[in-house]
Image (cartoon, helix red, strand yellow):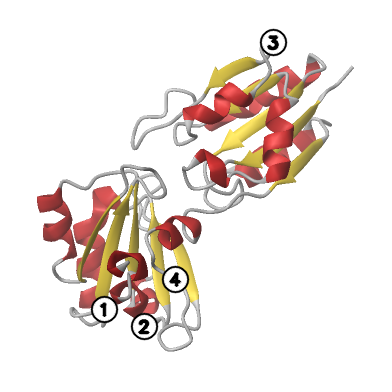
Amino acid sequence: MSGKVWLVGAGPGDPRLITVMGMECLRQADAVVYDRLVNRLLLAEAPAHCVLIDVGKRADHHPIPQDRINAILIEQARLGRSVVRLKGGDPFVFGRGGEEAEALIRAGIPCEVVPGITSAIGGLARAGIPVTHRDFASSFHVITGHLRDGKDPHNWQVLAQLDGTLVILMGMSRLEDICQQLIAHGRSADTPAAVVMNASHPEQRMVLATLADLPERARLAGLAAPSLIAIGEVTSLALLQSL
């Protein structure tokens, strides 16, 4: 008898930011297949009998390929288990949740998506940065800084001209190049920008700078992945810093 898979977003980091539905799924799971950025405190919410499977990836180091992760989900469900695929942020925002859902559907495995708070919004909010603001940004754009097969998928000419807030996930290894590309293609070097490391965690840290100065300021502060990069006038607010 086949089980079922829930693709659950764990939120930006703080375990309290998982949704009520996500927590309900976790507390009823027979197996949890989780990523590196999932807060380990959430795993303690799973039942005692639950099988915990770590499929975490790091930048440029994927010990378990995506095809194998898909196969694990299918295998666990075919054992008749209720399977939670626990992913940082939202499963459909650069989380490969779409690929996993496709694989499950092809295999005839019932699946359900439980949205999570993406770090692109929730992580910045916890740092006091609103992605939109009536006076500064009426739109926001989320892109990945991670390259596939060494290729740059971005049209920097277009990205540099976008109004609103630009949020870049998984981009710390390319921070200097990202800032240089945006400036070279027309974005002002004086544009306010920020890097937020460990967003929503107690050890959260942030650097505020201009687009031109951001890479050096982040380096001097020792900021590294996992971090969010935000570019736009809203970063100059950093509202919680004044409280």
Q: Is residue 69 left or right of residue 219?
A: right
Please give the name of the residue rendered at 36% of the width and 43% of the height, measured from the top-left corner: 202
Mark 4 to mark 1: distance in Å? 25 Å
Label 1 sits on residue: 185
Vertical relation: 107 (above or below) 147: above
Circle on res. 130: 4
Amino acid type at mark 2: Gln
Mark 1 to mark 2: distance in Å? 8 Å
Please give the name of the residue rendered at 83% of the width and 34% of the height, measured from the top-left corner: 110
Label 2 sits on residue: 161
Amino acid type at mark 1: His
State the residue in front, 226 or 66. Answer: 226
Which tag is nearer the camera, tag 2 or tag 4?
A: 4
Quadrant of residue 123 in the image? bottom left
Callout 2: SS? helix
Circle on res. 80: none
* Residue 232 appears in view: yes
Label 3 sits on residue: 49
Please give the name of the residue rendered at 31% of the width and 42% of the height, measured from the top-left corner: 203
Disc 1 crowd rating (10 Å Cα; few below 14, some 14-19, many 20+) is some
Amino acid type at mark 3: His
